[in-house]
Amino acid sequence: MKAFTEMKRLPTLIISLLGIAILMMACAKKRPVLYPNLTYKTAGASAAMADIDECIQLAANHGHATDAGKNVATSTAKGATTGAVVGGAVGAVTGRPGRGVAAGAAGGGAGGLMKGVWKSGDPDDIERRFVEQCLRDKGYKVIGWK
């Protein structure tokens, strides 16, 4: 009997672990990808990575680091607000506006949360441009972020 109970919990455990792994991957901070020009080849990969770290830290020191938590919270709030408005409209048509607002807010909030988590590793435009300029000043060529 105990084995049967544990078997019933296995799918929940697997889904939970997969969810945690996905969230951890989504939260990973994106970094610039460098073109292997003469500067990159001369410096070597490890020195180039150290230069990237230095430029990211320089951006943070000048107040241009992205606040991932704030971005996730903002995205969640926007999603919940949009969902509540749409849910309220649907609820008004079906005769249950309160339930529509609640369902819409929950669904929109969940969608906004996931969007925020997926994009939480993306630097904001100012941080991205700051880091790219710093790397250009060092002679590197940024071809994207990953």
Image (cartoon, rainbow, N blue to C red):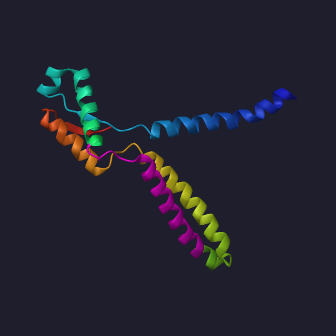
For residue 115, above or below residue 12 = below
> Where is residue 30 drawn, in percent x and y?
35, 38
Residue at x-position 51% and y-position 38%: 22
Residue at x-position 23% and y-position 40%: 131
For residue 122, above or below residue 48 = below
Is 85 in the magenta?
yes
> Where is residue 137 drawn, in percent x and y?
13, 37
**Residue 105 occupies which quadrant of the picture?**
bottom right
- Taking the image as shown, residue 134 lies to the left or right of residue 17, namely left
The quadrant of the picture occupied by the C terminus is top left
Looking at the rendered structure, the number of numbered marks drawn on it comes to 0
Is 82 in the magenta?
yes
- Taking the image as shown, residue 75 lies to the left or right of residue 109, namely left
Residue at x-position 58% and y-position 70%: 87
> Where is residue 136 drawn, in percent x and y?
15, 37
Dominant secondary-structure state across the stretch colored magenta: helix
Residue at x-position 25% and y-position 32%: 54
Instruction: Identify which residue, 80 or 59, lies in the foreground.
Output: 59
- Taking the image as shown, residue 41 lies to the left or right of residue 60, namely left
**Residue 133 occupies which quadrant of the picture?**
top left
- Taking the image as shown, residue 31 lies to the left or right of residue 81, namely left
The quadrant of the picture occupied by the N terminus is top right
> Where is residue 72 drawn, in percent x and y?
46, 51
The residue segment tinted magenta is 62-89
